[in-house]
Image: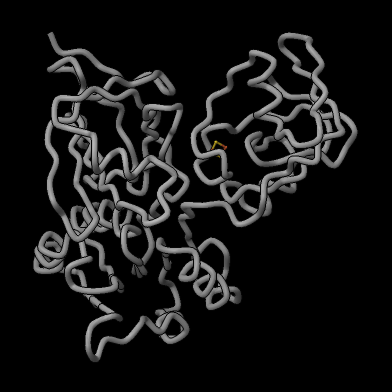
Amino acid sequence: MSGDLARPDAPLSLRVHAMTYEAEAVLGVELRPERAGELLPGFGAGAHIDLHLPGGLRRSYSLTDEPGERRRYRIAVHRAVDSRGGSRWMHESLRPGAVLAASGPRNNFPLTESAARSVFIAGGIGITPILAMIRRLVALGRPWDLHYATRTRAHAAFVEPLHELARQGGGRLDLRHDREPGGRPLDLAAIVRELPQDAHVYCCGPAGMLKAFELATAHLAPERVHVEHFAGKEPAAAGGGFRVKLHRSGRTLEVAPGQTILDCLVAAGVEPMWSCREGVCGTCETRVLDGVPDHRDLVLTPDEQARNDRMMVCCSGARSATLVLDL
Ligand code: FES
């Protein structure tokens, strides 16, 4: 009998159905519900899931399919040179048939479907959420441009489906390989300078690219600019020296020097949801009922941070002596 796994935040049990070679150091992984016939929670373009890996590791991966796909989640895993274990384990030990726990999907990088034109800038594995966005725009018949940079041709994943999507109309593809003879890096300032007035612009890629993008787009209206971060920019607030009151349980905890709020909660046996621990995935978002957080995340917009009514407890601290959290 067909079931539905669509309850938000319910843990998912996913079976690795297939693994594919997508590019140098990039594996494609197709995940399906462990129980055949069940449907997965729906998602919007730009969404990610968090996979729970051995050793307590949790890693976020963008979904590459067009929204509406409920039978499978497809992700791509880049083997990072400086892997802290997640991508290395996925490349060396994960096999079809394995079952993984997961949470999500969540979307910190949503697509503005109504934009007159969408311009995407992708670096390396940053293509994954953008692939889902382009699939969506092609389904809607809306125009897009993609500037996609990788070190070499061999490092470029999903080139065939991208060409196919461009052939279906409405899309322009600009592929760059800066480590190949004659290869040139993307000129982000020029791309931004030439943006049509009403275009929205998106960037996902390595930290250096994101920094250059943020500089190049600083003058644009924030609602036209969209960035997906893989890693935090600032160190987590771990100075301690403040109290956290847990409104629902009535407990008060002292956050000690060297601890984040999440460390303190976990040590006290409170297990909020978390994944990246770097303020980029949004999993640990917690309502703030009183007090002033010291925001260090890249999930909330500056306006959202200024409201001080929610925070990422994995990385953000306190500017007030006490924070009251809805936990
Ligand atoms: Fe990812 Fe806190 S665990 S934002």
- Image quadrant assignment for residue 120: bottom left
Relative horizontal placement of residue 72, taking residue 127 as reference (left or right): left
Image-quarter location of ligand 1: top right
Where's residue 54, x and y in %? 37, 27
Q: Position of residue 93 (x, y in %)?
A: 24, 35
The answer to whether residue 194 is above or below residue 282 is below
Residue drawn at (49%, 70%) of the image: 208
**x then y, percent, for residue 296:** 68, 48
At x 26%, y 51%, the residue is: 132
Q: How many marks?
A: 0
Q: Is residue 216 above or below residue 223?
A: below
Picture quarter with the N terminus: top left
At 35% from the left edge and 27% from the top edge, which residue is drawn?
102
Q: Quadrant of the C terminus?
A: top right
x and y percentages locating residue 91 in the rendered image: 24, 43
Write down the quadrant of residue 252 in the picture. top right
Left or right: where 35 falls relative to 294: left
Q: Nearer the viewer, residue 275 or 239?
A: 239
Check the image and report above or below for 30 versus 247.
below
Which residue is drawn at the image coordinates 13% and 51% (left, top)? 21
Colouring convention used in this rendered image of the protein: one colour
